[in-house]
Image (cartoon, rainbow, N blue to C red):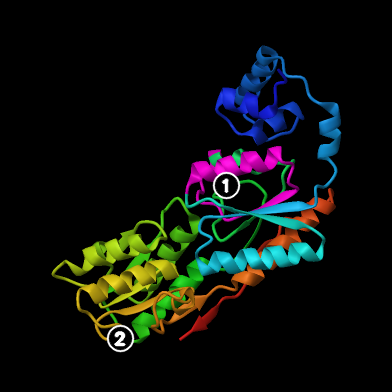
Amino acid sequence: MTVRLVDIAEHLGISVSTVSRVINGKDRVKDETRKRVLEAVEELQYRPNEIARSLRYQNSMTIAVIVPDLSNNFFNLLTKGAATAAKEDNYLTILCNSDYDQKMEQEYMNLLVQKQVDGVILATVCKEKDYFENIITDDMPVVFVDNLPDVDLDFNYVTIDNERAAYDLTAHLIQQGYEDIAVLTGSLHETSAVKRLQGWENAMKSHDMTINQQFIGVGDFRIESGYNMMASMLNRRKRPDAVLAANNYLAYGAIRAAQDKGLLIPDDLYVVCFDAVDKTGLININIPSIIQPAQKIGEVAAETLVKRITDKNYTLYDNIILEPIFKG
């Protein structure tokens, strides 16, 4: 039976890309991990297929986009932009939905390495260093969007200034006269959630506003999470009079929770958010929003990825920050 890279990876409980880096003599692998891989190579009697290895360095003319929620209009537009830009360079695009599941995201990455996809645009659901040491490789170019890894490694990304955008939204609430301002954000394993929370906190502090810890909601970026966090806040004697939702689905959940309590939007609860709630097609309320240029983010990410793929000497790690639009 022929032993494959994936067999070694499954045997050791590590990623295919890590095994590939060891076998190809690449850096960014811990000594202990390298030793385990080499021992497994001997134990399992792995022999590289030289024909397959030579083919690996020819482009398959396919890229992949991994996002956590294709039903969200932001990621829908992002993938559309990426696929359109990739097509202009004759690349086909594979779409993968991780469903905010880190394990599924890793499985997709392993599969894409096996299928010899040329590169990946990744809206990751994690930020930890150990996780990304297995993803950021020389063999598989990756461009990050939306959520960025918190690592000291070189990588390409395309995003907005999430902290500044959250600051501006919170400042807008303060300027409107609101004082009891809540925030709803996603998992703190995601840098976008962390940055948006930081922006809210910085705005509150710089305007000498009181920060009520009970008005800080941390969950995930789903509608149900927004509903549950807002419902919990509204059940308290001291209620917020405004809320910053870190994405449109959290905003929708918060609005539904308020409406179920008999509250009026925006009279009883003023809501601002990232990305337009009315664009989701779920409700018809005009909510002040920071609109991310989702399609442009996808386009620029694909253009950057193709540069990485086609020019092996391309070592420019662009930190591309695009400007969002405030919609009042």
Q: What residue is drawn where x is 39% and y is 57%? A: 220
Vertical relation: 229 (above or below) 11: below
Tell me the element at label 1: loop
Tell me the element at label 2: loop
Q: Residue furthest front?
A: 1
- Crowd rating for badge 1 (residues with CA inside 10 Å; few <14, some 14–19, many 20+): some
Q: Is residue 215 left or right of residue 147?
A: left
In the picture, the quarter occupied by the C terminus is: bottom left
Whether 239 is among the magenta residues is: no
Three-letter amino acid code at disc 2?
Gly
Q: What residue is drawn where x is 55% and y is 27%? A: 13
Q: Quadrant of residue 242?
A: bottom left
| Residue range (magenta) | 101-130
Q: Position of residue 30 (x, y in %)?
A: 62, 29
Q: Which mark is residue 177?
A: 2
Q: Position of residue 293 (x, y in %)?
A: 60, 73
Residue 293 appearing in the image: yes
Vertical relation: 6 (above or below) 267: above
Three-letter amino acid code at disc 1?
Val
Mark 1 or mark 2: whose residue is earlier in sequence: 1
Q: Position of residue 241 (x, y in %)?
A: 25, 78
Q: Position of residue 58 (x, y in %)?
A: 85, 43
State the residue position of label 1.
Answer: 151
- Give whichever of 309, 149 is nearer the camera: 309
Counting every numbered tag in the picture gives: 2
